[in-house]
Amino acid sequence: MRQSRLLLTTLREAPAEAEVISHQLLLRAGFIRQLAAGIYIYMPLGRRVLRKVEQIVREEMDRAGAGELLMPALQPTELWQESGRYNVYGPELMRIQDRHDREFALGPTHEEVITSLVRNEVNSYRKLPVTLYQIQTKFRDERRPRFGLLRCREFLMKDAYSFAADWEGLDQTYWAMFEAYHRIFTRCGLNFRPVEADAGAIGGEGGTHEFMALADIGEDTIAACNCCEYAANLEKAESQEYVSYSSSLSTDPMEKFHTPGLRTIDQLIEALHIEAKDIIKTLIYMADDQPMAIVVRGDHEVNEVKVQHILGSEKFEIASADIVSMVTGTPSGYIGPFGLKIPVWVDYAVAQMSNGIAGANELDYHYRHVNPGRDIELRHVADLRNVTEGDRCPRCDEGELKLYRGIEIGHVFKIGTLYSEKLGANFLNASGAKQTMIMGCYGIGISRILSAIVEQNHDQNGIIWPSTLAPFQVHIIPVSVKDNLQMQIAEELYNQLQNQGVEVLLDDREERPGVKFKDSDLIGIPVRIVVGKDAEHGKIEWVERGASNKETIHVKETSKRILDIQALASRKI
């Protein structure tokens, strides 16, 4: 491609709305342009990268035995009513009406559509198992689109769905997809980690893993062991708890004392010269509109997802100040787990405490010398908190948990019969009896991968694309397009490499060398070949993006070097 014919405009400064480095660099380097909040145009360079991600995904999906199809983005909402997700999905589901007042949704996902398709196409165990996938645009009405391609209202996704006759069949497909995702993200050059996760809005009856690209700006927190392979999303992460209600109990009786104006953890720490871990924190929540108390240590946070799963509630949220006052008779800051006429759930870490400080359910008063095993009714004890750095690994005896930030780039689910049962996806088994299909669901954020790659691969000058995803493999830059010899060598290299199947961008613009080099660094093509003052000796300057050194080599060496890089980029694992 000749750069003079490419729609490519680079920006010296990032737009003010671009908060994170990937958003800034993709805009500045001309890969994307914003049309509206959370809606982007993929410019020619950006589309080339997307196509390479798609190709890797297709190759690995095909290798795993999945068949590609393409489903409509426009979905009749009757299917969402049938699955029960119409109201559950909430305002993120974009709804529209046609001229006949029939309601449709712009698909954020395709569980309903694929299940309705398979129920009509598959009626016998002889046609199972089957796995189908598509790469298609999705729509979600995000409340706050941000971080460029990381949280959009319109985005590109690969979603796959498997149907099996039994749980064993689902398990085989699940792990085949798990391994396929490993290969996909490795080939994309990502630093990633698969983690145990919560199923979220997709739901399901079996296991689920998220694939996280490690990045400081990630919206998810990952807990990973420093000794074994255990890793989990913070919502799912556990620590090794050994509950012993009688260890290290203080012999001092529980005592009420005056704490005027000490409402917060920080105020108690400063006034009483204690640590947050010495405080017993009681919070009032509403579970399906019923009040309940959650008791955690002062240095811990309630894990609302864990609690919701333990309770089996559909709705779980912190109670308002009015409800707290009505239920406890006490303003926030002085609530304790004593004498409450509502269910009280106590975290394991609190059950192990001795000599703690807790609210006395009276304005300006707390209790000290609180021993939960003695002073709190431990009827409901469970893991109710977020893990913290340094907690013991739940899978091995030696490891500690470390916390990382991550960008979710893929998710695999065992969803069982959640959709097939509601939508009637049944088949006849070998005995002629009707059975419900067992489903799996597997998604990859195709467009999101661009941002994840740039977050992990950049420097102060711009993007550093892995060779597998770079829009072009080689950037040829003649220092002066008016120099006939330089242009002759540049053109010969350009044609030779193109004939060998190498993707080449030739900068044939009449621009100053400094502008060309800055643009080249910003765009991030792996190899830059500069044809300059040594052209008369048949030599060019070889620069690999991200490397500190530059080499002067003979033009004849170029082809072999490029082919070696190309072979490495196309190598499968």
Image: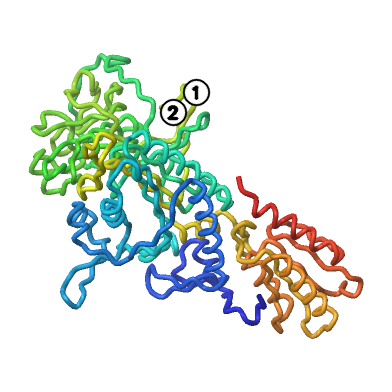
Q: Residue at x 21, y 41 (%)?
A: 333
Whole-angstrom CA distance, mark 1 to mark 2, is 8 Å
Q: Residue at x 54, y 55 (%)?
A: 56
The amino acid marked with disc number 1 is: Glu
The amino acid marked with disc number 2 is: Cys
Q: Is 171 drawn above or below residue 45 in the view shown?
A: above
Residue ID for mark 1: 398
Residue ID for mark 2: 393
Q: Is 415 drawn above or below residue 3 in the view shown?
A: above
| Callouts 1 and 2 close, C-beta under 8 Å | yes
Q: Residue at x 87, y 74 (%)?
A: 535
Give SS at disc 2. Answer: loop
Q: Residue 543 in the image: x percent, y percent?
A: 75, 62
Q: Residue 105 in the image: x percent, y percent?
A: 25, 65
Tag 2 or tag 1, which sits nearer the N-term? Answer: 2
Give SS at disc 1. Answer: loop
